[in-house]
C-alpha cells in the first residue's frame, strides 16, 4: 500500500509526513527535473506502508516542474490512496486544488490541518458538513500538537474513496466536456486538461484545441481562466457553507515592521549579515576541527603506510577529496542550510523577497532571486540548485551566472588568507567591492543579452511563526545529503585525476606551457598557474597549493603585494569549482555550464591582467 | 400585431428549426417562448398572412425566405447582446439572456455590428502595458493606481503568461482584494482569499481592478 500527501505549499505536509514516518526517509530525484520526492515508511498494526510527500503546488494545470510531477503522478495512479492536506485558515484557497484533485477520481481522504490556528483566528469549521459536500472522509488535525494525527493512517486504509464533488463549469465548457467524452470516450479530467492544452494524446489535443479556440473567441478569456474562475467560485460556495467567522484574538502585526522600507530594509540587511557572519564563524571553527582530525587520524597514518608511490598518490587524492567534501559540507553548507531553513520556516524569506524586489529588478531579476544570491555567499553549489525557484529560464540563467561570481565561503578563505593577511584588510575589502561591481555590471550586461521574458514576483507570504527545530534539521539534512550526492563524486574524480597528472608530470608540462601567460600577462610566478588549477577543484586549495609550491607559508616573503592581490582576485573570479560546474550542468544544461565557466575564466584573466598592468 | 412578438416568433421558429432540423409545431413554439398556445396560434396565422411563414396542414410551421432572414437577424442580435452583457460587462448568464430578449427588439443593426467588432478585435485593455502607447489611454485602472488599505474588485488580468500563477492564487475577475502594503516602487502586498500575496510592480500593473462599493 502506498499513500501520497498532496496539498498547497506550507499547509503542513512535511510536518505530518515527519510525524508519520520518523527516521529512514529517502529522497528520490525525479529524472530530468530538480524536484525531489520524499518517501518514508509508516507502521500500523504491524504492517508497513509507504508514504510519499509530494511537493507543494497551487494547481494541477500549470507547467512548473512540481506541477508536472504531481500531475503525472496522479495520471499514473501511482498511489493507493491520496491524503489531501488543506490549511484550515485558508480553506477556500486550498479547496481550489482539492476540486482539481477530485476530478482524477482516485481514492482519497482529506485532512484539514492547523485547526489550532483556525480556532485562534476565531474560525469554526463544520468538518462533518464539509465531508458531506465533498463525498470523502475529512479529519480535522493540528499536526504541531499531534492532535488527530493518529487517525490519518486508519482512515486512509479504511475509508479512502473517490470524492464525489464536481465543479459546475460554464455551460460552454460543460458542453465541450460532454462532447469530448462522447466522441473520444476520454475521461473528464483528461478532457479538462486537454482543453487547456495539456495532453499526450494527439487526437484529443487536436479536437480539444479547436473547441477551446471557439470558446475563447466567444468569451474573450482563455479556457484556463474560465475554468479557474469557475473553480474559485465553487470553492467559495463550499467554504462559505462550512466556515463560520467569529471573534479573533488580535495580536500585534509584526509585518507592519518587516514589510515597510523603514525599518524593514535595515532589518533585512542585519538579518542576512548576521546569518552570513555566524555561518562563517561557526563554519571555520568546525572546519578546523574536522580538517585537523582527518589529517591526524586518517591522512598521516595512510601516508606512513609505505605503499607503492602510485597507490599512495591515488589513495591520498581520494582521502583529500573526502576531507575537502566533509570540510566544506558540514561546517559551511550544513550550517548555512540550517540558517536558510530557519529563514524559510519562520516565513521571513518571503518578506525578504518582497523588500529585495526593487534592487533585484535593476539587475534583470526579481525579489525571489535574493534567496539563491544569499545562499551563494555560503556555497555556490546549493545556490545554483536553488535557482529553480525562479520561474523563467532567462532569470535562472542570469542568476546562475551571477551566483558563480558571488564570493562563497571558500573564496572568503582565499581573500582572508592571502590579501587580508599579507596585503592589508582594506585591500581585502576592495576585492569584495570589485567583485560586487563586476556582478552588477555583468547583471546589466546579461539582462540585455539573455533571451526570454522577464517575469515578476508573485509570492504567497507565509504567516510568520516560530520554526520547529525538528523540521529545520530534517530539511537541512535532506539538503546536505543532496549536496554530498552531487559534490562528492565530482570531488573524488577530480582529485584523483589531478593526483595522477601530478604523478605523471602533466602538471609540470602544463605549468611550462602557460608560463609566458602567467609571468608576462599576469606578472605571477610560474607555479601560480598550478595553484590556480588546483583552485578549480576547491577554491581554498588555490591558497593552500600556493603555499606548498612557494615552499613557505609566509607568502609575503616570496611574492609582492601586487602579485598576491592579483592572484587572489583571479582565483576568486576565475572558473567556478568543479562541483559548481557539475551542478550547473545538472540544473541548466551543458551550454550554460560551459558558458558560465568560460565567462568567469575570461573575466578572471582579464581583471588580473588589468590589475597587473595598472599597478605594476 | 406587436412587432416584438413578431420578432420573437420568427427567432424562436428559426432556432427551433435549426436545432431539430425539422419544422416545429405550435406547441413547441409556445413552450420555447413560454406563452399560451392560443396567442402563438393567432400570431402564426398573422405571420402566414404576411408571408413570413407557411403554416402547413400537418400543423408545423416553416419559414419563408423573408421570415428566415428576419429570424436569423434577431437570433444573432440576441446572441451578441447576451455575450456582451455576460462576458464584457460581467452580468450573470441568465439575467444577461433575459435582458437580451428585451434589448434585441430595439437595438439597431449598426449598434449590433459595432458591438460585434468590439468583441472580435482585441480591445485596448488587453494590450495595455505591453506597448508604450497603451499606457495612459487605458480606461481601466490597475492595482498600482490605488493605495494602502483600499478595498478593490478584480476586473481582469492582462497578459496570459503571467496569469497562470495569479489565477491559482485566486486573482480572478470578481474577486475582492485589499492592498495591505505599497512600497514607493509600487511593489504590493495584497490580501486575497485570506492570504497575503507579494507582487512585483509590473505584475501589479497587469491586474485591472475597480473600487468595491
Ligand atoms: N499552527 C499550526 N502550524 C502548523 C501546523 N502544522 C504545520 N504548521 C506549520 O506550517 C508550516 C509549514 O509546514 P510544512 O510541514 O513545512 O508545510 P509543507 O506542506 O511541507 O510545505 P511545502 O513543503 O512548502 O509544500 C510550518 O512552519 C509548521 O510549523 C499546525 O497544525 N498548526
Ligand atoms: Mg514540505
Image (cartoon, coloured by chain):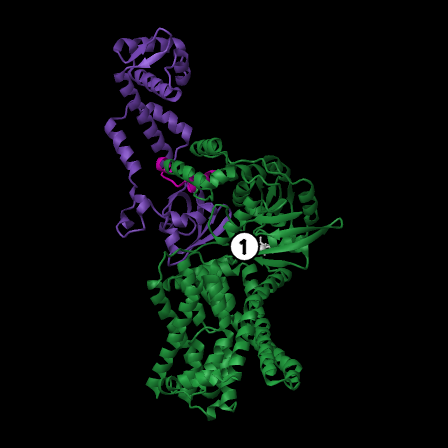
Chain assigned green: A
Q: Position of residue A90 (x, y in %)?
A: 55, 46
Against A491, is A150 above or below? above
Q: Residue at x 67, y 40 (%)?
A: A159
Q: Is residue A101 left or right of residue B200?
A: right
Residue A360: % across, % down: 40, 63
The purple-tinted chain is B
Answer with the quarter of the image where residue B65 lies.
Answer: top left
Image coordinates for residue A149, horizontal then vertical, percent? 68, 49
According to the picture, the residue beneath numbered tag 1 turns out to be A463
Ligand number 2: quarter of image: bottom right
Magenta-highlighted residues: A216-230
Instruction: Name the element at disc 1.
Output: loop
| Chain containing mark 1 | A
Quarter where residue A137 is shown: top right
* Residue A307 can be seen in this image: yes
Q: Residue B120: within the magenta? A: no
Identify the residue at image location x=44%, y=79%: A571
- The answer to whether the beta carbon of the residue marked 1 is less than 8 Å from any atom of ligand 1 is no
Amino acid at each position: 500500500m502506498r499513500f501520497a500527501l498532496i496539498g498547497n505549499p506550507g499547509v503542513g505536509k512535511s510536518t505530518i509526513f515527519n510525524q508519520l514516518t520518523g527516521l529512514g526517509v529517502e529522497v528520490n530525484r525525479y529524472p530530468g527535473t530538480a524536484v525531489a520526492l520524499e518517501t518514508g515508511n509508516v507502521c500500523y498494526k504491524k504492517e508497513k506502508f509507504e508514504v510519499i510527500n509530494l511537493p507543494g503546488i497551487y494547481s494541477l494545470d500549470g507547467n512548473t516542474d512540481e506541477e508536472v510531477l504531481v500531475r503525472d503522478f496522479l495520471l499514473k495512479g501511482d498511489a493507493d490512496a491520496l491524503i489531501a492536506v488543506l490549511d484550515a485558515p485558508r480553506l477556500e484557497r486550498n479547496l481550489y486544488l482539492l476540486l482539481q484533485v477530485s476530478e482524477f477520481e482516485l481514492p482519497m481522504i482529506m485532512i484539514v490541518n492547523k485547526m489550532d490556528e483556525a480556532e485562534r483566528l476565531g474560525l469554526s469549521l463544520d468538518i462533518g458538513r464539509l465531508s458531506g459536500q465533498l463525498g470523502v472522509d475529512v479529519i480535522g488535525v493540528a499536526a504541531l500538537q499531534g492532535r488527530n494525527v493518529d487517525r490519518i493512517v486508519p482512515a486512509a486504509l479504511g475509508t479512502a474513496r473517490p470524492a464525489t464533488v464536481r465543479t459546475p463549469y460554464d455551460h460552454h465548457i460543460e458542453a465541450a466536456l460532454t462532447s469530448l467524452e462522447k466522441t473520444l470516450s476520454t475521461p473528464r479530467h483528461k478532457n479538462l486538461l486537454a482543453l487547456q492544452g495539456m495532453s499526450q494524446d494527439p487526437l484529443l489535443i487536436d479536437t480539444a484545441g479547436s473547441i477551446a479556440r471557439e470558446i475563447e473567441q466567444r468569451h474573450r478569456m482563455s479556457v484556463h481562466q474560465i475554468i479557474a474562475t469557475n473553480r474559485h467560485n465553487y470553492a467559495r460556495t463550499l467554504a462559505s457553507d462550512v466556515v463560520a467567522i467569529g471573534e479573533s484574538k488580535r495580536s500585534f502585526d509584526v509585518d507592519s515592521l518587516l514589510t515597510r522600507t523603514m525599518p524593514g530594509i535595515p532589518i533585512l540587511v542585519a538579518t542576512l549579515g548576521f546569518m552570513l557572519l555566524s555561518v562563517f564563524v561557526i563554519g571555520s571553527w568546525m572546519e578546523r576541527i574536522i580538517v585537523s582530525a582527518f589529517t591526524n587520524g586518517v591522512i598521516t597514518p595512510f601516508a606512513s603506510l609505505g605503499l607503492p608511490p602510485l597507490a599512495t598518490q591515488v589513495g591520498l587524492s581520494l582521502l583529500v577529496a573526502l576531507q575537502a567534501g566533509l570540510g566544506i559540507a558540514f561546517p559551511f553548507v550544513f550550517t548555512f542550510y540550517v540558517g536558510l531553513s530557519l529563514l524559510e520556516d519562520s516565513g521571513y524569506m518571503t518578506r525578504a523577497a518582497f523588500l529585495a524586489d526593487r534592487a533585484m529588478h535593476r539587475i534583470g531579476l526579481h525579489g525571489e532571486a535574493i534567496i539563491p544570491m544569499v545562499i551563494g555567499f555560503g556555497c555556490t553549489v546549493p545556490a545554483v540548485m536553488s535557482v529553480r525557484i525562479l520561474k523563467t529560464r532567462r532569470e535562472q540563467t542570469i542568476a546562475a551566472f551571477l551566483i558563480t561570481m558571488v564570493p562563497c565561503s571558500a573564496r572568503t578563505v582565499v581573500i582572508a588568507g592571502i590579501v587580508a593577511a599579507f596585503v592589508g584588510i582594506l585591500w581585502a575589502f576592495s576585492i569584495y567591492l570589485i567583485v560586487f561591481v563586476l556582478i552588477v555590471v555583468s547583471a546589466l550586461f546579461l539582462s540585455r543579452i539573455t533571451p526570454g521574458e522577464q517575469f515578476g514576483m508573485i509570492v504567497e507570504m507565509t504567516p510568520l511563526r516560530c520554526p520547529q527545530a525538528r523540521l529545520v534539521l530534517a530539511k537541512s539534512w535532506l539538503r546536505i545529503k543532496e549536496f554530498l550526492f552531487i559534490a562528492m563524486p565530482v570531488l573524488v574524480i577530480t582529485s584523483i585525476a589531478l593526483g595522477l597528472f601530478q604523478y605523471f608530470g602533466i602538471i609540470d608540462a602544463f605549468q611550462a606551457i602557460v608560463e609566458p601567460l602567467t609571468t608576462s600577462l599576469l606578472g605571477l610566478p610560474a607555479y601560480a598557474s598550478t595553484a590556480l588549477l588546483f583552485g578549480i577543484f576547491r577554491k581554498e586549495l588555490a591558497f593552500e597549493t600556493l603555499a606548498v609550491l612557494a615552499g613557505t607559508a609566509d607568502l609575503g616573503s616570496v611574492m609582492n603585494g601586487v602579485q598576491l592581490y592579483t592572484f587572489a582576485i583571479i582565483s576568486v573570479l576565475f572558473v567556478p569549482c568543479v562541483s559548481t560546474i557539475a551542478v550547473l550542468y545538472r540544473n541548466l544544461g551543458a551550454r550554460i555550464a560551459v558558458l558560465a565557466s568560460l565567462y568567469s575564466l575570461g573575466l578572471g584573466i582579464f581583471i588580473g591582467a588589468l590589475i597587473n598592468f595598472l599597478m605594476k | 400585431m406587436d412587432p416584438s412578438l413578431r420578432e420573437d416568433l420568427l427567432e424562436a421558429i428559426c432556432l427551433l428549426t435549426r436545432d431539430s432540423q425539422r419544422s416545429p409545431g405550435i406547441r413547441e413554439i409556445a413552450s420555447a417562448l413560454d406563452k399560451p398556445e392560443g396567442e402563438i396560434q393567432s400570431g402564426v396565422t398573422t405571420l402566414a398572412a404576411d408571408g413570413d411563414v407557411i403554416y402547413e396542414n400537418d400543423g408545423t410551421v416553416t419559414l419563408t425566405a423573408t421570415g428566415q432572414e428576419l429570424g436569423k437577424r434577431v437570433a444573432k442580435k440576441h446572441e451578441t447582446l447576451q455575450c456582451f452583457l455576460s462576458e464584457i460587462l460581467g452580468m450573470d448568464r441568465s439575467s444577461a439572456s433575459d435582458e437580451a430578449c428585451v434589448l434585441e427588439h430595439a437595438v439597431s443593426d449598426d449598434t449590433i455590428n459595432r458591438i460585434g467588432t468590439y468583441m472580435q478585435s482585441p480591445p485596448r485593455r488587453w494590450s495595455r502595458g505591453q506597448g508604450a502607447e497603451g499606457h495612459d489611454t487605458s480606461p481601466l485602472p490597475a492595482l498600482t493606481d490605488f493605495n494602502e488599505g483600499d478595498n478593490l474588485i478584480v476586473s481582469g488580468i492582462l497578459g496570459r503568461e503571467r496569469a497562470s500563477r495569479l489565477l491559482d492564487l485566486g486573482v480572478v475577475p470578481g474577486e475582492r482584494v485589499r492592498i495591505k502594503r505599497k512600497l514607493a516602487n509600487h511593489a504590493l502586498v495584497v490580501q486575497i482569499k485570506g492570504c497575503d500575496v507579494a507582487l512585483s510592480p509590473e505584475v501589479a500593473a497587469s491586474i485591472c481592478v475597480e473600487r468595491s462599493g
